């Protein structure tokens, strides 16, 4: 993974955000998973935070969503629930901007889980109810598409 990280940093230094995004999201050889997921799975949260933050405001919107999700999940694992919430909220903003209902649902579910972990149960329930609304709209759209 070191080579992938070095290449990622090089592309960021020369501001080639498209290539940096490709490394961030591309499958790592022999592992068949993206670099970002490998870092998360192995608990390299600080490294994942560093590269996600570096790319989060430069990449295309769909990659920004992945960055914000990785930031939120990493901060959550490190016990910084407020930073996790901030990043999940950023997902909501971008997902709604581009009409990405699936990412909106992921953000709402993540917010619900995070608020629950903080003991903020009313807020957790509210987020989960919003998630149910998104899931319902997705299901209806899929049924209509099959007709």
Image (cartoon, grey):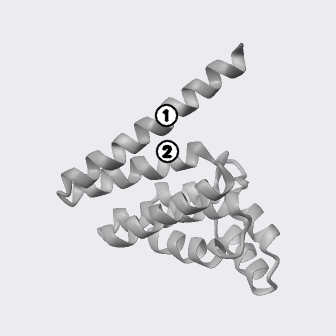
**Residue 115: x and y, percent?**
27, 57
Q: Which structural element holds mark 2? A: helix
Q: Which residue is mark 1?
A: 135
Q: CA distance from mark 2 to mark 1?
A: 7 Å
- Which image quadrant: the C terminus? top right
Q: Decide: few, some or many residues near mark 2? Use Cα within 10 Å; few <14, some 14-19, many ≥20.
A: many
Q: Which residue is mark 2?
A: 105
Measuring 64% from the left and 58% from the top, which residue is drawn there? 97
Measuring 69% from the left and 48% from the top, which residue is drawn there? 30
Q: Can see residue 60?
A: yes
In the displayed structure, would residue 82 be above or below residue 34? below
Q: Can see residue 43?
A: no
- Residue 24 placement: quadrant: bottom right
In the rendered view, does 23 fall on the left or right side of 80?
right
- Residue 21 placement: quadrant: bottom right
Question: Marks 2 and 1: CB-CB under 8 Å?
Answer: yes
**Residue 7: x and y, percent?**
75, 74
């Amino acid at each position: 993974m070191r080579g992938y990280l070095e290449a990622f940093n090089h592309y960021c230094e020369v501001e080639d955000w498209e290539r940096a995004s490709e490394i961030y999201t591309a499958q790592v050889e022999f592992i068949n998973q993206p670099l970002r997921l490998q870092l998360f799975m192995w608990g390299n949260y600080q490294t994942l935070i560093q590269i996600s933050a570096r790319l989060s405001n430069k990449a295309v919107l769909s990659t920004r969503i992945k960055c914000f999700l990785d930031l939120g999940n990493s901060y959550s694992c490190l016990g910084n629930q407020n930073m996790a919430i901030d990043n999940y909220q950023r997902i909501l903003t971008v997902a709604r901007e581009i009409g990405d209902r699936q990412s909106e649902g992921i953000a709402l579910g993540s917010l619900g889980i995070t608020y629950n972990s903080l003991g903020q149960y009313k807020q957790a329930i509210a987020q989960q109810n919003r998630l149910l609304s998104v899931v319902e709209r997705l299901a209806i759209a899929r049924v209509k598409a099959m007709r």
